[in-house]
Image (spheres, rainbow, N blue to C red):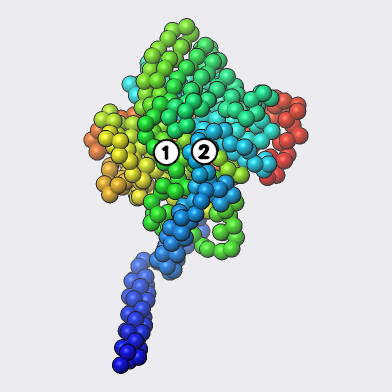
Amino acid sequence: MLTEVLLWLIWMGGVWMLLMVGVWGVCWSLQPLPPPRHATHPYSNPSFFFPLKVIIFYFIIKFRKRTGGSMEGAGYGTKSHGRQDLMERPQVLHSCPKAIDAVFFSGAADGWGIILAMERRPNRLTSVVVYLKVPNTGVLTLPCHPDTVTFRPEDAEDAFCAAGLTISLLTPVKSWKLQFSGKLRLHSNPKDDPKDVKIDLHWVSNLPLFDYDTDMDVMTTAQAFAQEPWTRQYFQQLREHHQTHYEQMGHLQGYVTLDGESHNIYLPAFRDHSYGKLRDWRLMHRYVFHHIFLENGCKGVVGVVCQPSTCSRLVLGNWWCNSGKGAAVTWVDLDLKQHGERGTPPKDYAFTFIAGGEQHVVEVEVVASPQHYLGWDWEARMVETWVKYRVDGVSGAGICEWNYRHCEGRPEELNTQDPEWAAKYRPKYLAA
């Protein structure tokens, strides 16, 4: 009797599986044909096995979340370090010429705005970004912009210190110090007389880190990677091209001095920290990240990334209510290929995103659009748009960063101005 029941259950299970496969196949066949590959490249279309791949990748992430942290195996559910203080400090750079350790700070409110960022690479190669938005004046930037290439002093090899900018960790996950002293000019007028500028700010936060290695929504991540064609080479690229990236919301407070006139500022703010064996800007097709600070205290980041070697449409972000409750962004209807695909970001647009099960409507109005280049060969073009936001009817401010692949190289007259000792490292960087 027991044998007959087991056989009956097995038979019913088989019938049920065949029925599900049949329904799946019928539903798939009724869908409109996707556009040809060349029409959507580099954006991938899901294949017939997309649902199955989602399930597989979902359980891969769930399994990896149970493992310990390590730099070699970080990402897709696994932390890079077991302790946050080890994540926060300047990282030991890998020997790869394009290894990276980068920090980025932004804030905006009441007409003021600031971006201070630095990329550390081997052989003291550094990229420095300084933007200061001043009410009734405009956006100030370094005289050398749009070029960001510089070199750290020999005694600051393991620090975020170059081109007059110093970014120092004070207390892990709690506070940083940002200082700049030097000349800044109006980005819209390269012939403008530079202003003497001093920036002395403290970053402070009581909110947790949002680590993209472990804190992204698992189903959203699985759906993104399931869209890609899976091969052995693809999974090798997932491992080789991974960078740890985490973010935190907080505020910046301190002083900005312009030609001797001091201003006390207090800004809602964002920061991130990225590090890994390889940051090759040539792998990135493009991305967009919105840094949003609302008047009611809500804030967050909403982005979409297209890096064809790993994921052609990856939804990223985190949203924080004024109560301090945060959630991962799980869905965004902003389609990159329909927004500035040919190199010019839109200046008036809207999109919808979901975080924590709640849907939000974002309206974007661009105020200014300075740009700069990253990489020793200017492999990336970054458009830092200063923005007026409105989310669910609530006004706010912030920035929106658009990334584009740049293929025209760094002007040779700039390369010849690099230090003589650095010249021997450039071919190694370009070949990596």
Q: What quarter of the picture does the C terminus occupy?
A: top right
Three-letter amino acid code at disc 1? Leu
Whichever of callouts 2 and 1 sits on the residue coming sooner in the sequence is 2
Q: Nearer the viewer, residue 317 or 408?
A: 317
Q: Position of residue 233 (x, y in %)?
A: 60, 60
On screen, residue 372 versus residue 12, left or right, reads right
Q: Nearer the viewer, residue 45 or 178?
A: 178
| Residue at which label 1 appears | 209
Q: Position of residue 110 (x, y in %)?
A: 33, 21
Q: Secondary structure under badge 2?
A: helix
Three-letter amino acid code at disc 2? Met
Please tell me which residue is depicted at 75% across the width and 26% down the height of the picture: 420
In which quadrant of the rendered view does residue 31 lie?
bottom left
| Residue at which label 2 appears | 87
Q: Is residue 324 above or below residue 53?
A: above
Q: Nearer the viewer, residue 409 or 312?
A: 312
On screen, residue 347 versus residue 83, left or right, reads left
Q: Secondary structure under badge 1?
A: loop
In which quadrant of the rendered view does residue 377 lie?
top right
State the CA–CA distance, disc 2 to disc 1: 10 Å
Please tell me which residue is depicted at 42% across the width and 60% down the height of the picture: 58
Q: Position of residue 335 (x, y in %)?
A: 39, 49
User: Badge 1: few (under 14), some or many (20 or more) residues near its Cα, within 10 Å?
Assistant: some
The answer to whether marks 2 and 1 mark residues whose Cβ atoms lie closer than 8 Å is: yes
Q: Nearer the viewer, residue 403 or 62?
A: 62
Please tell me which residue is depicted at 51% across the width and 51% down the height of the picture: 68
Q: Single out the residue that lies furthest toward the left.
A: 393
Please tell me which residue is depicted at 45% across the width and 54% down the height of the picture: 65
Residue 163 at least partly seen: yes
Q: Is residue 255 above or below residue 131?
A: above
Residue 149 at least partly seen: no
Q: What quarter of the picture does the N terminus occupy?
A: bottom left
